[in-house]
Structures are given as C-alpha cells and as structure tokens.
Image: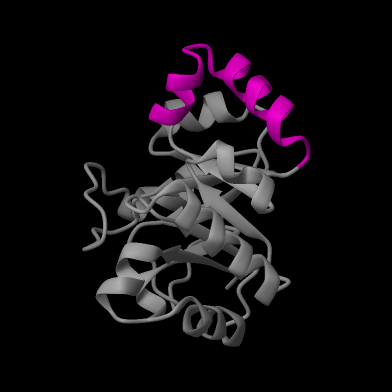
Amino acid sequence: MRLYALCDFETLIKKNISLSEFLSVATSNNALIIQYRDKSDSFEQKKQNLIFLKQHTDIPIIINDEINLVQFCDGLHIGQEDLTSINKNHDLAVKLIRKKIGNKILGLSTHNEMEILEANQLNLDYIGLGAYRGTNTKDVSTILGDRLPYLAKISKHKVAAIGGIKQDDNIPNVYYHVIGSGLL
C-alpha cells in the first residue's frame, strides 16, 4: 500500500491531535504524500500550518483547493467544482493552473467514467477517485465500491482511492490509498 495521508485540520482539532503528532503518524506509516485540507481557518493560519509541515518533513505536501497557497507547498489538489470555477473549459483551467504552479504536483478529484476520461486529456499528475466507501468526515453522494478498480483501470494517471479507505484494503489498479481519520 502506498499511503497518501490526508491531514484534515478540522479533524485534528476535534481529536485534539497536533500537526507534529499527525506528522509522526504519517511518517511511521511511510506516507508518500500529505494533503493538507483546511476549510475553516484564515489564509494566514493555513499558510503557517503549511510552512510548519514543510519545515518538519521531507514528505511532499499538497494543499487542498487553495491555489494561492501553493507557493508554500509541493502541489495542489482540486475538485471538479474548483476546476469549473477557474474556467468551464477544463483543459484551459488546467493550463491556467499549470501557469501558476509550474511543475508542482497537481491532482483532480473524479467520481465517474466521464470525469476520468476527461482527466486523461488533462496535464495532471494523479486523480483522486471515489468515494470507495461512505465516510464520517465528508458528505459523499456517490459510493463506487467494487466499481472503483474498473474505473481506476481506465485512468492514464496514477489513481488515489479516496473515501473510507482502510490501510488493509487491497484495491486493484490503485496507486495511492488516501487515508485521513483512519490513521488517527
């Protein structure tokens, strides 16, 4: 299993876990990537948290959704809605993002065959695909379950399985297992 550790700051606060403690867990589980997701704090607080993470680990750090914070980390993960808000033409939206982030890591959430086939035409490093299972930390409308391996197989990009992933899951055609609260 290749771990993609999801650092959801709101979950850390609820569980009284510090960023240092999260990094310790991610490191001890051999995380290959860490995504920092924070939907509530100020820009400045998010920036400080990213700087802290970057200073305390060599694991690549990716910011969720916030392109204006990408200068403080190693990449960006965006959702379908975020891509559309940049430009309705997703190819142009990705080109605009690439202009800003350069060769940093870029991932896009996908949920179905149509989105994967479109993503195959985009300049991405990986896709997030899910949700595999239901989860308590995010509302999900689509549960892929046993369909996820087939969908992952049609992606030309590395696939990061998201949504209720467990460390002992064995999901064919998936490169990363994205685990957040399941690590804590």
| Corner quadrant of residue 137 | bottom left
For this view, does 132 lie left or right of residue 44? left
Looking at this view, is 57 or 47 the one in front? 47
Q: Looking at the picture, does residue 82 appear above or below residue 151?
A: above
Q: Quadrant of the C terminus?
A: bottom left
From the top left corner, tell me how far across and down residue 96 is, in percent: 65, 21
Residue 7 location (% of width, % of height): 45, 66
Q: Nearer the viewer, residue 50 or 153?
A: 50
Pick the quarter of the image with the N terminus. bottom right
Residue 50, above or below 3: above
Task: Give the residue displayed 21% in from the left and 49% down from the top.
Answer: 139
Q: Is residue 32 left or right of residue 154?
A: right
The main secondary structure of the magenta stretch is helix
Q: Nearer the viewer, residue 60 or 117?
A: 60
Q: Residue at x 46, y 64 (%)?
A: 6
User: From the viewer's perspective, is residue 30 above or below residue 49?
Assistant: below
Q: How many marks?
A: 0
Can you give x and y, in whole percent of width and height, for residue 120 in the image?
Answer: 62, 30
- Does the magenta-highlighted stretch encompass residue 178? no
Give percent across and percent down for residue 126: 62, 45
- The quadrant in which residue 61 appears is bottom right
* Residue 99 located within the stretch drawn in magenta: yes
| Residue 19 shows up from this direction | yes
Q: Is there any visible trace of residue 176 in the rendered image?
A: no
Identity of the residue furthest to the right in this view: 103
Which stretch did the figure color magenta? 81-103
Residue shown at the point (39%, 63%) measured from the top left: 8
Q: Nearer the viewer, residue 126 or 35?
A: 35
Residue at the image position 55 percent from the left and 54 percent from the top: 47
Furthest residue to the top? 89
